[in-house]
Amino acid sequence: MADPRGFLRNRDRELPARRPVPVRIMDWREVYEPHDEAVLRRQAGRCMDCGIPFCHNGCPLGNLIPEWNDLSWRGSWREAIDRLHATNNFPEVTGRLCPAPCESACVLGINQPPVTIKQVELSVIEKAFDSGWVTPQPPDRLTGRTVAVVGSGPAGLAAAQQLTRAGHTVAVYERADRIGGLLRYGIPEFKMEKSVLDRRLQQMAEEGTRFRPGTEIGAPGQVSGRELRDRYDAVVLAVGATRPRDLPVPGRELGGVLQAMDYLTPANRAALGENSDVELEQVVATGKDVVIIGGGDTGADCLGTALRQGARSVTQLEIMPRPADERPADQPWPTYPMVYRVSSAHEEGGERVYAVSTTEFVDDGTQQVCGLRLVEVELVNGRFEPVPGSERELPAQLVLLAMGFTGPEPGGLLEQLGLELDERGVVGRDERFMTSEPGVFVAGDAGRGQSLIVWAIAEGRACAAAVDEYLKGSTALPAPIRPTDRPLTV
Ligand SMILES: Cc1cc2nc3c(=O)[nH]c(=O)nc-3n(C[C@H](O)[C@H](O)[C@H](O)COP(=O)(O)OP(=O)(O)OC[C@H]3O[C@@H](n4cnc5c(N)ncnc54)[C@H](O)[C@@H]3O)c2cc1C
Ligand code: SF4
């Protein structure tokens, strides 16, 4: 333990400043200012190096948190990045985007604000990139075995990096025109600039991973699932859970009522200046009253994007009641609690309305949405019941549906491989991440259901260990989770 009295001397969490709202909504750059090193080291020194570090249990990657907190406090950045990379392929991603279940599980959090674990993680990896310590780690020799990874989100990329480093020849197929999955066109630039992704992809390419963007496996005229299986010694399906939940109420077919990803993807591409045709075709929020249905990460990303596009008003609707400000008694430490959270986008504007349900979208007479009818709801015996007399209408020329994802898309690739979705709507797999088709594995949201980046990376790493064992009969790769592991709950 670096500083035995650190947590007594420094009881407050200190995080880097965010750029002023009026400034940051004028551009798409990340919202955080760089962190002062002295403050960071002071914060790392609050770690108590617990005998049983519950932060480990909160994180599916099993990150060696007390070790790199200690090394950061001492300023031993080189050693710190080695410990960080020992369990996480992409700390620059989790350091920016993870909701940090490790911090909810931190022992210090029982009676003090928890250690700023995520910020320490981010500072360590950024220092490593700045110092040129993140270099390619190609394998010493090749095994002669080949692996196809389908899908280039965090699960596919983590699996690919692990398997390439283990000596297999790995190709990553992606239907989008660029690699990255939701990290590329789902998550907006203001949460993570894409240059962060590109420098990691460069490392992977130099290690030998081959990238095949613009290839939708299983689509007409493209490589079929069966052909892919025949060409490679093993296949990892990391196709995500991209099937969005819908809201089949009257008026759903009106123009201006969109699934969130149909809005975010072109908005992100235009923000990146990638394609002027996209800019011409995209639906923009400029000058509109925007209503976002769904209160999660996707909804917050729509909010920040709409504000930057110059929306007149933005309202985010949520069917659940407003969460408490403090951890509720039925979600005790060390679980990840449902509390009222203010993301950077929420700081920037918009209104959040809780405990309401949309009953109808209103037609302006030209098949375009001009408003939305809603009703307040309350939970009665586990069901949402409308509150009589609480109906009202909101103006809305753009409605974004951000109500989550139900699982991977059926048909196509999955059908060609004879794979069915299980009762949860995801691809079934055994305890080795293998589907009913021998040699075909599944990782990430496609097998787990809609989840988080940190779980996707853990899935990719564990699936890579299973693939390596399948190909070689044994493996030295780490497997941080089993397919059935779930977040800490009571
Ligand atoms: C808008 C949004 C914001 C989010 N924000 C956060 C956040 O801040 N923090 C967090 O922890 N989590 C966040 N999440 C969740 C997180 O992004 C996902 O859990 C994670 O990306 C899942 O990773 P994955 O690799 O399983 O799949 P994805 O990232 O979904 O990648 C799957 C890829 O497979 C490709 N694909 C599918 N079928 C084929 C095919 N037949 N051939 C070739 N390619 C194919 C898709 O094009 C896609 O690129 C967010 C999700 C969304 C939608
Ligand atoms: S639980 Fe918190 S205080 Fe304890 S080792 Fe982990 S980060 Fe440090």
Image: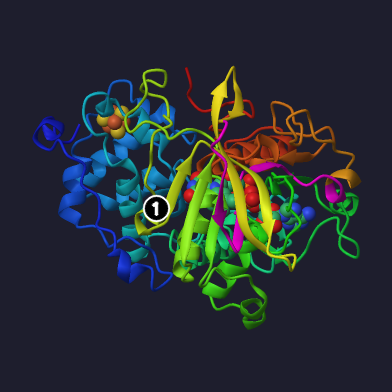
Q: Is residue 159 visible?
A: no
Compare residues 439 and 341 and report the one nearer the observer: 341
The amino acid beneath tag 1 is His
Q: In this view, does 152 lie above or below 419?
A: below
Q: Residue at x 52, y 66 (%)?
A: 198
Say which element carries label 1.
helix
The residue beneath circle 1 is: 346
Image x and y of residue 342, in percent? 37, 46
The residue furthest bottom is 276
Q: Which residue is drawn at 89% across and 44% down?
A: 415
Q: In this view, does 380 lie to the left or right of 58?
A: right
Q: In which quarter of the image is residue 106?
A: top left
Image x and y of residue 375, in percent? 57, 39
Magenta-span inclusion, residue 173: no
Q: Residue at x 33, y 33 (%)?
A: 325
Q: What stretch is highlighted in magenta?
A: 388-413
Compare residues 363 and 110 and report the one nearer the observer: 363
